[in-house]
Image: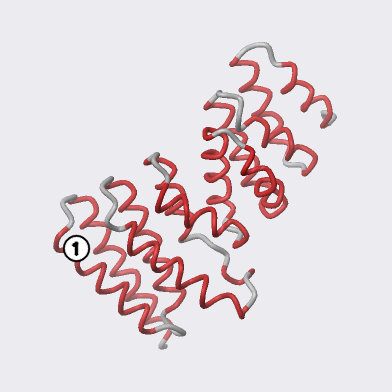
């Protein structure tokens, strides 16, 4: 087995973009907590391929990556911060929720808004304390209703995915929220300028209906 310190050293000593990419990919594949600091550092190396590999590695390590990401988030340059948002979105830990809410609604980069919006539909709600659940889900609902009007269709598409997920999550406990989501989806199905969005909305409506039917059986 390759020693983890050897893999980390290979990242630190990479002398070309290709070698850096290969070194980060190898480190990510190792899937060990000891790699987290080096993977996070790789987010800021101005090498998109290496950043993608680092994000995949951090997502694979799951919850263990969240606090290190959050602790360093404010000190990042914009590029590294954007990659960190993607990692938090992929992990789905509720501790990253505030970052995702802000990025989905405010980030100037379409790809970051899309990733954060998609991440809002993948939050592991069971990890959140019961006394915080309702408020957190209400924030997500408000954000998704807002983002569903984004001027970029790909961000709206992500909003539809996440509205579908949220609708299924809250259908039993928050019927009023379910009604709001259904109203928004009805509106998008009729008025969105993108045929792709309208088609995805109708699929979401079908999936919500199937989930509601199953829950009542």
Q: List the residue tagged with mark 1.
A: 189
State the quadrant of the N terminus.
top right
Instruction: Give whichever of 148, 4 is nearer the camera.
Output: 148
Q: Which residue in the rendered view is the most extreme toward the top?
A: 15
- The residue drawn where x is 39% and y is 67% is 142
Q: How many marks?
A: 1
Quadrant of residue 57 in the image?
A: top right
Q: Residue at x 28, y 74 (%)?
A: 182
Above-or-below relation of 140 to 133: above
| Direction from residue 154 to residue 18 in the image, left or right | right
Viewer-proximal residue among 110 and 122: 110
- Describe the colour scheme in one phrase: secondary structure
| Extreme residue toward the bottom, this view | 217
Quadrant of residue 20 within the rendered picture: top right
- Quarter in which the C terminus is drawn: bottom left
Compared with 124, 31 (above or below) is above
The answer to whether 97 appears left or right of 115 in the picture is right
Q: Nearer the viewer, residue 71 or 208?
A: 71
In the image, residue 7 sits, relative to residue 123, either above or below, namely above
Q: Position of residue 70 (x, y in %)?
A: 65, 49
Report helix, strand or loop for mark 1: helix
Count residues near mark 1 (Cα–Cα under 10 Å), then give few for <14, some for 14-19, many for 20+. Answer: some
Q: Quarter of the image holding residue 140? A: bottom left
Left or right of 88 in this view: 187: left
Whole-percent x and y of residue 150? 29, 51
Residue farthest front in this picture: 75
Residue 132, given in percent of the width and then of the height, sits at 59, 75
- Pinpoint residue 32: horizontal percent, then vertical percent: 77, 42
């Amino acid at each position: 087995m390759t020693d983890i310190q050897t893999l980390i050293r290979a990242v630190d000593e990479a002398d070309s973009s290709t070698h850096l990419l290969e070194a980060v990919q190898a480190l990510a594949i190792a899937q060990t907590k000891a790699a987290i600091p080096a993977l996070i550092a790789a987010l800021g190396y101005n090498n998109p391929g290496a950043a993608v590999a680092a994000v995949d590695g951090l997502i694979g390590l799951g919850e263990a990556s969240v606090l290190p990401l959050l602790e360093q988030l404010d000190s990042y340059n914009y590029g590294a911060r954007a990659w960190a948002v993607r990692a938090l979105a992929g992990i789905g830990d509720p501790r990253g929720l505030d970052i995702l809410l802000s990025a989905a609604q405010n980030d100037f980069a379409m790809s970051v808004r899309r990733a954060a919006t998609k991440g809002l539909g993948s939050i592991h709600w069971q990890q959140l304390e019961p006394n915080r659940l309702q408020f957190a889900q209400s924030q997500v609902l408000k954000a998704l209703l807002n983002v569903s009007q984004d001027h970029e269709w790909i961000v709206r598409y992500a909003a539809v995915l996440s509205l579908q997920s949220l609708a299924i999550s809250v259908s039993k406990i928050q019927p009023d929220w379910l009604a709001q989501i259904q109203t928004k989806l009805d509106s998008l199905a009729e008025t969105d300028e993108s045929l792709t969005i309208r088609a995805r909305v109708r699929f979401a409506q079908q999936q919500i209906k199937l989930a509601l039917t199953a829950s009542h059986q």
